[in-house]
């Protein structure tokens, strides 16, 4: 059996991932990646008294580390806390810079690429671990060329294959996603049967370094005031002003600070002029996009091909033609208009359940 590193967040998914690998007889080493970002001393639970399933509105890194350690103790596996604060600062710097540039960042994809499937593999190599495992809802399937294919999880409501497109293809053979074959309710039931202390722990719903969900406040704290600008319609009419581009993303409807008697959406952001352009839902329509920074999980493609493309984690995949432009860029032409295509977000390419790769919307 193999030695395997499991990234343990203190949540139920990664805890069950570690337990399943332990049951299979592997030598499991649990690691918690401390990012050094100070959160509130206690997590707030939304919905805890309303009859809805509770959700964590933030996370407490020290508390989560303690939970991960308790799970490791219960499983009888080794456990270490790794200090990734310096590396995590780079993720936050990216997040701030993208908002200031009028783009919409996706820090989960960047964190996966740089840390979970970057630095964590360096640690795995240092302890001679064959595999790295996480609690992501995704699957790996055998392919004829010997390189596993990344495919959607069995639970479509929890599938996280979208945020994994940036993985180095050469690492797929050393990855394990033990919970990808299960539905979420099955994972919680397994955790309860195993007696894991986090079986009922709510899922975190926010970015880990923005526990209160106030992205703009974090940007201002890190980079200072960004300056004011105009809010204009697509016809050029000035209808308001704003205090920073970090308050906006393409497709946004709420919190615009304008009242025109009809619903308005952010259609585009013009960072050079510090201008936010609003318009109707129809004006959000987009039939084509170009993506850069492409990462392919299949052999490089050179001709246009049919596929489905997701432009946000929670959006469906839309039928399209995908045309490689060079080694790092591709163009997407959708069959039908998409709405809310935001520069800075990921465009991830699928054929059926399989992830072919993706890039960053320009």
Image (cartoon, rainbow, N blue to C red):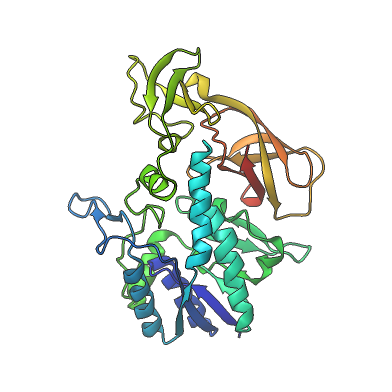
Percent x, y of residue 135: 48, 66
Q: In the image, is 140 to the left or to the right of 218? A: right
Q: In the image, is 251 to the left or to the right of 321? A: left
Percent x, y of residue 158: 46, 54
Percent x, y of residue 203: 35, 59
Residue 351 visible in this rendered orientation of the protein: no
**On screen, 185 above or below 361?**
below
Q: In the image, is 170 to the left or to the right of 37? A: right
Residue drawn at x 73%, y 64% is 147
Percent x, y of residue 283: 51, 20
Quadrant (top left, top right, bottom left, bottom right) of the N terminus: bottom right
Residue drawn at x 42%, y 33% is 227
- Number of numbered discs: 0
Quadrant (top left, top right, bottom left, bottom right) of the C terminus: top right
Residue drawn at x 41%, y 34% is 244
Q: Residue furthest left?
A: 49
Res 66 → quadrant: bottom left
Q: Nearer the viewer, residue 7 or 90?
A: 90
Residue 339 visible in this rendered orientation of the protein: yes
**On screen, 150 above or below 177?**
above
């Amino acid at each position: 059996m193999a030695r395997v590193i499991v990234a343990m967040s203190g949540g139920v998914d990664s805890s069950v991932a570690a337990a399943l690998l332990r049951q299979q007889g592997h030598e499991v080493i649990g690691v918690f990646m401390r990012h050094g970002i100070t959160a509130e001393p206690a997590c707030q639970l939304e919905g805890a008294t309303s009859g809805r399933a509770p959700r964590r509105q933030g996370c407490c890194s020290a508390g989560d580390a303690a939970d991960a350690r308790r799970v490791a103790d219960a499983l009888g596996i080794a456990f270490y806390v790794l200090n990734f604060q310096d590396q995590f600062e780079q993720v936050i710097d990216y997040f701030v810079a993208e908002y200031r540039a009028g783009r919409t960042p996706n820090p989960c994809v960047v964190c996966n690429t740089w840390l979970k499937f970057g630095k964590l593999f360096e640690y795995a190599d240092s302890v001679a671990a064959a595999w790295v495992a996480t609690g992501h809802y995704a699957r790996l399937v055998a392919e004829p060329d010997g390189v596993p294919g990344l495919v959607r999880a069995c639970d479509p409501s929890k599938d996280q294959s979208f945020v994994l497109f940036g993985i180095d293809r050469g690492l797929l053979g050393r990855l394990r996603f033990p919970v990808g074959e299960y539905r979420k309710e099955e994972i919680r039931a397994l955790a309860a049967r195993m007696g894991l202390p986090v079986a009922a722990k709510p899922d975190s719903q926010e970015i880990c370094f923005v526990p209160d969900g106030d992205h703009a406040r974090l940007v201002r704290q890190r980079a200072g005031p960004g300056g004011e600008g105009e809010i204009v319609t697509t016809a050029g009419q000035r209808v308001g002003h704003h205090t920073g581009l970090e308050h906006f993303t393409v497709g946004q409807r709420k919190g615009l600070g304008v009242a025109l008697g009809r619903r308005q959406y952010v259609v585009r952001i013009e960072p050079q002029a510090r201008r936010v352009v609003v318009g109707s839902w129809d004006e959000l329509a987009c039939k084509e996009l170009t993506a850069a920074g492409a990462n392919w999980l299949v052999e490089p493609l050179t001709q246009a091909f049919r596929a489905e493309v997701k432009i946000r984690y929670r959006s469906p995949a839309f039928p399209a033609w995908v045309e490689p432009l060079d080694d790092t860029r591709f163009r997407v032409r959708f069959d039908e208009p998409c709405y809310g295509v935001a520069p800075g977000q990921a465009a991830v390419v699928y054929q059926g359940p399989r992830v072919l790769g993706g890039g960053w919307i320009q």
